[in-house]
């Protein structure tokens, strides 16, 4: 029997300046101008959510709004309850990671359309069919809805804190090792490997490597923000094509998740992935020094201290990283890294010191 591989991609992606008001028009063009629930964060994203709601009202599209504070099980249940109560047929995520993750996961549970309106470029979940929800077992991505529409207003995204912009870059650079891990799993375990999805993922990382000097500037130029957004969307589409997070999440993400477990979410996800990528590149025998140089140049953390954790916590994270997703084979292997090896890795890559 022939294996069937289904690929569900976003129907439309709109990137540009001052385009957030066009959301109702885009929904009408897609024939989904239906009851909508707008999910936003609880801070500055409320302003952008109001702009979206005003646009929907101007086009006589029924809409409701809800704010979330965390991407966790309790917030999922809250938003799902509201979505079912108001009979929402479209879930619109306006904000950073948590709002978009909650909206896309609730859309999946509610069998609704999902629309992504990112306001920060700190993650590659903008266009991916996966969501990171806490308190759902282990801290790994879960299947969610592919966005039917992505509205990426670069004027809004450029106003995001610089730290979030840099975190997005670091997350993308992690694709350098996620693809290496995927290839390794294919060679050693016979796991499905999609060369096109892998190539697309690597391309998104190379996009940042090629243009890293733009991100090193104190004020990130609009040109750089657009490059970042396009690369993040490209990474999300690579996951949609692969049907899993494999092209975008490997040992570097397992290390990041382990850091969250050990140190209780001490930094932005992309910042943790950057540290994880240095370690993973070292384990793969690749040029980790260049990656560390680029991360340092753009202002991303390159030591345990800069990440906000103790060296001992990083050591512990390395020893448990392989247990996060035991079904996913990576360079960490089945038995993981010993405490002695972890200490040696940290010493060699100088993650315990501010010396480059």
Image (cartoon, helix red, strand yellow):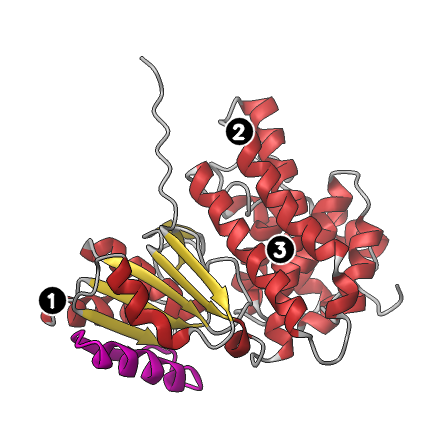
For the point 27% across and 57% down, the residue is: 30
| Residue at mark 1 | 87
Q: Are marks 1 and 2 in contact (CB under 8 Å)?
A: no
| Residue at mark 3 | 172
Instruction: Using the numbered discs, state the Cα–Cα distance from disc 1 to disc 2 in whole angstroms.
Output: 39 Å
* 4 versus 330 height, above or below: above
Numbered badge on residue 193: 2
The question of residue 248 being in magenta is answered with: no
Instruction: Using the numbered discs, state the Cα–Cα distance from disc 3 to disc 1 in whole angstroms.
Output: 36 Å
Q: Are marks 3 and 1 in contact (CB under 8 Å)?
A: no
Q: Position of residue 165 (x, y in %)?
A: 62, 71
- The kind of secondary structure element at disc 2 is loop
For the point 82% across and 45% down, the residue is: 287
Q: Position of residue 129 (x, y in %)?
A: 39, 50
In this orientation, which residue lies closer to the viewer: 20 or 321? 20
In this orientation, which residue lies closer to the viewer: 124 or 23? 23
Q: Which residues are magenta?
A: 41-69
């Amino acid at each position: 029997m022939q294996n069937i591989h289904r690929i569900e991609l976003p129907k439309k992606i709109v990137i540009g300046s001052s385009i957030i008001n066009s959301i109702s028009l885009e929904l009408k063009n897609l024939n989904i101008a239906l009851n909508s629930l707008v999910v936003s964060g609880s801070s500055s994203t409320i302003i952008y959510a109001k702009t979206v709601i005003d646009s929907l009202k101007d086009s006589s599209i029924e809409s409701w709004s809800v704010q979330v504070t965390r991407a966790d099980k309790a917030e999922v249940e809250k938003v799902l309850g509201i979505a079912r109560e108001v009979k929402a047929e479209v879930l619109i995520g306006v904000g950073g990671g948590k709002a978009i993750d909650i909206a896309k996961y609730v859309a999946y549970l509610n069998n609704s359309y999902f629309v992504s309106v990112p306001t920060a470029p700190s993650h590659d979940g903008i266009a991916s069919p996966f969501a990171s929800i806490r308190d759902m077992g282990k801290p790994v991505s879960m299947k969610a809805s592919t966005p039917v529409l992505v509205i990426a207003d670069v004027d809004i995204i450029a106003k995001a804190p610089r730290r979030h912009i840099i975190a997005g870059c670091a997350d993308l650079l992690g694709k350098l090792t996620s693809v290496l891990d995927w290839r390794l799993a294919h060679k050693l375990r016979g796991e499905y490997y999609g060369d096109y999805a892998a190539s697309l993922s690597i391309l998104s990382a190379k996009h940042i490597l090629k243009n890293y000097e733009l991100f090193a500037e104190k004020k990130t130029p609009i040109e750089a923000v657009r490059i970042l957004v396009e690369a993040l969307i490209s990474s999300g589409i690579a996951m949609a094509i692969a049907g899993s997070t494999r092209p975008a999440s490997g040992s570097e993400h397992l290390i990041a998740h382990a850091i969250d477990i050990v140190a209780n979410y001490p930094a932005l996800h992309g910042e943790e992935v950057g540290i994880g990528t240095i370690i993973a590149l070292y384990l793969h025998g690749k040029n980790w020094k260049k990656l560390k140089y680029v991360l340092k140049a753009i202002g991303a953390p390159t030591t345990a201290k800069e990440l906000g954790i103790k060296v001992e916590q990083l050591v512990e994270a390395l020893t448990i990283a392989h247990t996060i997703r035991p079904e996913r084979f990576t360079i960490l292997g089945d038995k993981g890294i010993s405490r002695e090896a972890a200490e040696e890795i940290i010493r060699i890559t100088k993650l315990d010191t501010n010396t480059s």
